[in-house]
Image (spheres, helix red, strand yellow):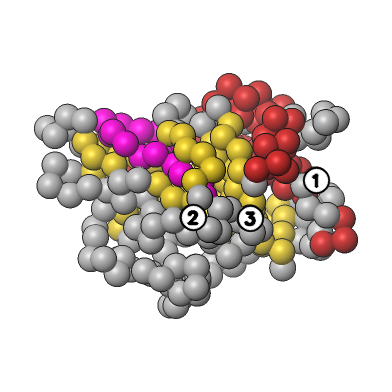
Amino acid sequence: MAPHPSKLTEAAASLEAAGYAFVRAPAMRAALLPAGLLDWEGFAASWDDLGLDRYMADGGRYRRRRFATFAVAPKAGTIRRKPHQPHYQSRDYNPLNGGIARWFDPVAETIGAHPTTQAIIGTCNTLFTALTAPATRPAAWHVEMHQFRIEARPDTEGRPTPEGMHRDGVDWVLVLLVRRENVAEGETAIADAAGTRLGSFVLTAPLDSAMVDDARVWHGVTPIRPLDPARPAWRDVLVLTFRRE
Protein backbone atom coordinates (compact mmCIF):
# COMPACT_ATOMS: atom_id res chain seq x y z
CA MET A 1 0.00 0.00 0.00
CA ALA A 2 1.32 3.46 -0.87
CA PRO A 3 2.10 5.86 1.98
CA HIS A 4 -1.14 7.33 3.21
CA PRO A 5 -1.45 11.13 3.16
CA SER A 6 -2.39 11.20 6.85
CA LYS A 7 0.82 9.33 7.87
CA LEU A 8 -1.44 6.63 9.34
CA THR A 9 -0.60 4.02 6.71
CA GLU A 10 -1.16 1.00 8.95
CA ALA A 11 -4.46 2.38 10.24
CA ALA A 12 -5.63 3.00 6.68
CA ALA A 13 -4.72 -0.54 5.67
CA SER A 14 -6.53 -2.00 8.69
CA LEU A 15 -9.64 0.08 8.05
CA GLU A 16 -9.71 -1.06 4.43
CA ALA A 17 -9.13 -4.72 5.24
CA ALA A 18 -11.11 -5.18 8.46
CA GLY A 19 -13.27 -2.09 8.96
CA TYR A 20 -11.48 -0.99 12.11
CA ALA A 21 -8.06 0.03 13.42
CA PHE A 22 -6.35 0.23 16.80
CA VAL A 23 -3.77 3.00 16.71
CA ARG A 24 -1.29 3.10 19.56
CA ALA A 25 -0.31 6.45 21.06
CA PRO A 26 3.16 6.77 19.46
CA ALA A 27 1.74 6.37 15.94
CA MET A 28 -1.10 8.76 16.66
CA ARG A 29 1.27 11.33 18.12
CA ALA A 30 3.56 11.04 15.10
CA ALA A 31 0.60 11.75 12.80
CA LEU A 32 -0.73 14.64 14.88
CA LEU A 33 2.49 16.54 15.57
CA PRO A 34 2.96 17.80 11.99
CA ALA A 35 -0.77 18.62 11.91
CA GLY A 36 -0.42 21.02 14.85
CA LEU A 37 -0.66 18.97 18.06
CA LEU A 38 0.13 21.42 20.86
CA ASP A 39 -0.64 22.05 24.55
CA TRP A 40 -1.94 18.56 25.27
CA GLU A 41 -2.14 19.37 28.97
CA GLY A 42 -4.51 22.30 28.40
CA PHE A 43 -6.61 20.25 26.00
CA ALA A 44 -6.91 17.30 28.41
CA ALA A 45 -7.67 19.56 31.39
CA SER A 46 -10.92 20.67 29.73
CA TRP A 47 -12.41 17.25 30.59
CA ASP A 48 -12.50 18.45 34.21
CA ASP A 49 -15.36 20.81 33.27
CA LEU A 50 -18.06 18.62 31.73
CA GLY A 51 -21.74 18.72 32.62
CA LEU A 52 -23.75 15.71 33.77
CA ASP A 53 -25.54 13.76 31.04
CA ARG A 54 -29.17 13.89 32.23
CA TYR A 55 -30.61 11.88 29.33
CA MET A 56 -29.53 8.43 30.52
CA ALA A 57 -32.56 6.17 30.21
CA ASP A 58 -30.94 3.66 32.56
CA GLY A 59 -31.05 6.30 35.30
CA GLY A 60 -27.27 6.43 35.50
CA ARG A 61 -25.38 9.49 36.70
CA TYR A 62 -21.96 8.22 35.64
CA ARG A 63 -21.51 10.10 32.35
CA ARG A 64 -20.43 13.72 31.79
CA ARG A 65 -20.11 15.33 28.37
CA ARG A 66 -19.91 18.33 26.07
CA PHE A 67 -20.82 18.45 22.39
CA ALA A 68 -20.02 20.44 19.25
CA THR A 69 -20.50 20.15 15.48
CA PHE A 70 -18.31 21.20 12.58
CA ALA A 71 -18.43 21.37 8.80
CA VAL A 72 -15.19 20.06 7.33
CA ALA A 73 -14.30 20.42 3.66
CA PRO A 74 -12.78 17.11 2.50
CA LYS A 75 -10.44 18.58 -0.11
CA ALA A 76 -9.53 21.97 1.33
CA GLY A 77 -9.47 20.72 4.90
CA THR A 78 -11.16 23.85 6.24
CA ILE A 79 -12.90 23.39 9.59
CA ARG A 80 -15.90 25.57 10.46
CA ARG A 81 -17.74 25.29 13.74
CA LYS A 82 -21.52 25.18 13.34
CA PRO A 83 -24.07 26.88 15.61
CA HIS A 84 -24.81 24.80 18.69
CA GLN A 85 -27.41 22.11 18.06
CA PRO A 86 -28.78 18.99 19.73
CA HIS A 87 -27.35 15.52 19.29
CA TYR A 88 -29.86 13.12 17.73
CA GLN A 89 -29.74 9.39 17.08
CA SER A 90 -32.65 7.24 16.02
CA ARG A 91 -33.62 4.26 18.14
CA ASP A 92 -32.36 2.07 15.30
CA TYR A 93 -28.83 3.04 16.35
CA ASN A 94 -29.33 3.85 20.03
CA PRO A 95 -32.24 1.90 21.52
CA LEU A 96 -31.42 3.16 25.02
CA ASN A 97 -31.14 6.94 24.58
CA GLY A 98 -32.16 7.52 20.96
CA GLY A 99 -35.32 9.01 19.51
CA ILE A 100 -35.06 12.43 21.15
CA ALA A 101 -33.05 15.61 20.58
CA ARG A 102 -30.48 15.74 23.37
CA TRP A 103 -29.06 19.16 24.24
CA PHE A 104 -25.66 19.02 25.91
CA ASP A 105 -23.40 21.81 27.10
CA PRO A 106 -21.30 23.07 24.17
CA VAL A 107 -17.61 22.33 23.88
CA ALA A 108 -15.83 25.47 25.10
CA GLU A 109 -14.89 27.82 22.27
CA THR A 110 -11.25 27.67 23.31
CA ILE A 111 -11.29 23.87 23.04
CA GLY A 112 -13.19 23.78 19.74
CA ALA A 113 -10.50 26.07 18.31
CA HIS A 114 -7.64 24.44 20.24
CA PRO A 115 -4.68 23.38 18.07
CA THR A 116 -4.98 19.80 19.29
CA THR A 117 -8.68 19.64 18.40
CA GLN A 118 -7.95 21.11 14.98
CA ALA A 119 -5.05 18.69 14.44
CA ILE A 120 -7.18 15.66 15.31
CA ILE A 121 -10.10 16.74 13.11
CA GLY A 122 -7.77 17.61 10.24
CA THR A 123 -5.88 14.33 10.44
CA CYS A 124 -9.12 12.33 10.54
CA ASN A 125 -10.42 14.30 7.57
CA THR A 126 -7.36 13.36 5.52
CA LEU A 127 -7.58 9.71 6.54
CA PHE A 128 -11.33 9.22 6.17
CA THR A 129 -11.61 11.21 2.95
CA ALA A 130 -8.89 9.12 1.31
CA LEU A 131 -10.75 5.95 2.35
CA THR A 132 -14.06 7.21 0.91
CA ALA A 133 -14.73 6.45 -2.74
CA PRO A 134 -14.33 9.66 -4.79
CA ALA A 135 -17.86 9.33 -6.18
CA THR A 136 -19.35 9.39 -2.68
CA ARG A 137 -17.17 12.04 -1.03
CA PRO A 138 -19.35 14.88 0.29
CA ALA A 139 -18.91 18.58 -0.32
CA ALA A 140 -18.57 18.80 3.46
CA TRP A 141 -18.39 16.31 6.28
CA HIS A 142 -20.75 16.81 9.21
CA VAL A 143 -18.44 16.20 12.17
CA GLU A 144 -19.69 15.74 15.71
CA MET A 145 -17.31 16.15 18.63
CA HIS A 146 -18.10 14.54 21.98
CA GLN A 147 -16.13 14.99 25.18
CA PHE A 148 -17.00 12.08 27.49
CA ARG A 149 -16.05 11.35 31.07
CA ILE A 150 -17.28 8.01 32.44
CA GLU A 151 -17.04 7.77 36.22
CA ALA A 152 -16.90 4.57 38.27
CA ARG A 153 -17.65 4.18 41.97
CA PRO A 154 -17.31 1.22 44.33
CA ASP A 155 -21.06 0.57 44.16
CA THR A 156 -21.68 1.75 40.58
CA GLU A 157 -19.84 0.68 37.45
CA GLY A 158 -19.28 3.20 34.67
CA ARG A 159 -20.65 2.27 31.26
CA PRO A 160 -18.87 3.84 28.28
CA THR A 161 -21.45 2.34 25.89
CA PRO A 162 -24.61 1.63 27.90
CA GLU A 163 -26.45 0.82 24.66
CA GLY A 164 -24.14 -2.18 24.17
CA MET A 165 -22.59 -3.18 20.86
CA HIS A 166 -23.78 -0.62 18.35
CA ARG A 167 -23.29 1.44 15.24
CA ASP A 168 -23.60 5.23 15.28
CA GLY A 169 -25.35 5.77 11.93
CA VAL A 170 -22.42 7.72 10.49
CA ASP A 171 -19.57 6.99 8.07
CA TRP A 172 -16.48 7.02 10.27
CA VAL A 173 -15.78 7.09 14.02
CA LEU A 174 -12.70 7.98 16.06
CA VAL A 175 -12.46 7.21 19.77
CA LEU A 176 -9.31 8.73 21.30
CA LEU A 177 -8.28 8.20 24.90
CA VAL A 178 -7.52 11.36 26.83
CA ARG A 179 -6.98 9.87 30.28
CA ARG A 180 -7.65 6.81 32.44
CA GLU A 181 -7.54 7.34 36.18
CA ASN A 182 -7.73 4.43 38.63
CA VAL A 183 -9.89 2.23 36.39
CA ALA A 184 -9.91 -1.41 35.37
CA GLU A 185 -11.57 -2.98 32.33
CA GLY A 186 -12.93 -0.77 29.53
CA GLU A 187 -12.21 -3.23 26.74
CA THR A 188 -13.20 -2.11 23.26
CA ALA A 189 -14.73 -4.90 21.17
CA ILE A 190 -15.37 -4.93 17.42
CA ALA A 191 -17.89 -7.25 15.75
CA ASP A 192 -19.50 -7.76 12.37
CA ALA A 193 -23.22 -7.48 11.66
CA ALA A 194 -23.73 -11.13 12.60
CA GLY A 195 -22.20 -10.54 16.02
CA THR A 196 -18.94 -12.36 15.31
CA ARG A 197 -16.13 -10.74 17.27
CA LEU A 198 -13.41 -9.41 15.00
CA GLY A 199 -11.04 -8.01 17.61
CA SER A 200 -10.66 -6.34 20.98
CA PHE A 201 -8.20 -4.06 22.77
CA VAL A 202 -7.99 -1.64 25.68
CA LEU A 203 -7.17 2.04 25.27
CA THR A 204 -4.64 2.64 28.04
CA ALA A 205 -2.29 5.49 27.07
CA PRO A 206 -3.31 9.04 26.19
CA LEU A 207 -3.77 9.21 22.38
CA ASP A 208 -4.46 5.47 22.04
CA SER A 209 -7.25 5.43 19.43
CA ALA A 210 -9.90 3.23 17.89
CA MET A 211 -11.19 3.97 14.39
CA VAL A 212 -14.15 2.25 12.75
CA ASP A 213 -15.91 2.14 9.41
CA ASP A 214 -19.39 2.48 10.88
CA ALA A 215 -21.15 0.94 7.88
CA ARG A 216 -19.17 -2.29 8.26
CA VAL A 217 -18.64 -3.01 11.94
CA TRP A 218 -20.21 -2.66 15.38
CA HIS A 219 -18.33 -1.51 18.46
CA GLY A 220 -18.78 -1.37 22.22
CA VAL A 221 -16.81 -0.93 25.44
CA THR A 222 -17.14 -3.00 28.61
CA PRO A 223 -17.98 -1.23 31.90
CA ILE A 224 -15.20 0.19 34.05
CA ARG A 225 -14.69 -0.14 37.80
CA PRO A 226 -12.30 1.46 40.30
CA LEU A 227 -8.97 -0.23 40.94
CA ASP A 228 -8.80 1.45 44.36
CA PRO A 229 -12.31 1.94 45.79
CA ALA A 230 -11.07 4.75 48.01
CA ARG A 231 -10.01 6.94 45.09
CA PRO A 232 -11.96 8.65 42.28
CA ALA A 233 -12.00 6.68 39.03
CA TRP A 234 -12.81 7.84 35.52
CA ARG A 235 -12.16 7.36 31.79
CA ASP A 236 -11.95 10.43 29.49
CA VAL A 237 -12.33 10.05 25.72
CA LEU A 238 -12.79 12.23 22.69
CA VAL A 239 -15.22 10.85 20.11
CA LEU A 240 -15.42 12.27 16.59
CA THR A 241 -17.96 11.07 14.03
CA PHE A 242 -17.85 11.93 10.33
CA ARG A 243 -21.06 11.77 8.31
CA ARG A 244 -21.79 12.77 4.73
CA GLU A 245 -24.14 15.73 4.55
Which residue type does callout 3 highlight?
A: Arg
Image coords of residue 140 (percent x, y): 76, 61
Q: How many marks?
A: 3
Of labels 3 and 1, the one closer to you? 3
Residue designated by label 1: 130
Image coords of residue 144 (percent x, y): 57, 58
The answer to which of 209 and 80 lies nearer the viewer is 209
Q: Earlier in the sequence, mark 3 or mark 2?
A: 2
| Marking on residue 216 | 3
Q: What residue appears at the point 43 percent right and 77 percent down from the top-left corner?
A: 100
Which residue type does callout 1 highlight?
A: Ala
Check if mark 3's residue and mark 1's residue have beta carbons within 8 Å.
Answer: no
Q: What residue appears at the point 22 percent right and 47 percent down from the top-left corner?
A: 157
The picture quadrant where one finds residue 29 is: top right
Is any atom of residue 149 visible in this view? no
Q: Quadrant of the C terminus?
A: bottom right
The answer to which of 188 and 145 lies nearer the viewer is 188
Q: Is residue 56 above or below residue 209?
A: below
Q: Which residues are magenta?
A: 177-191
Which residue type does callout 2 highlight?
A: Gly
Whether 190 is among the magenta residues is: yes
Is any atom of residue 161 visible in this view? yes
Q: Earlier in the sequence, mark 2 or mark 1?
A: 1
The picture quadrant where one finds residue 26 is: top right
- Dot 2: few (<14), some (14–19), or many (≥20) neighbours within 10 Å? few
Image coords of residue 224 (percent x, y): 29, 42
Q: Earlier in the sequence, mark 3 or mark 1?
A: 1
Residue designated by label 2: 195
| Marking on residue 209 | none
The answer to which of 132 and 30 lies nearer the viewer is 132
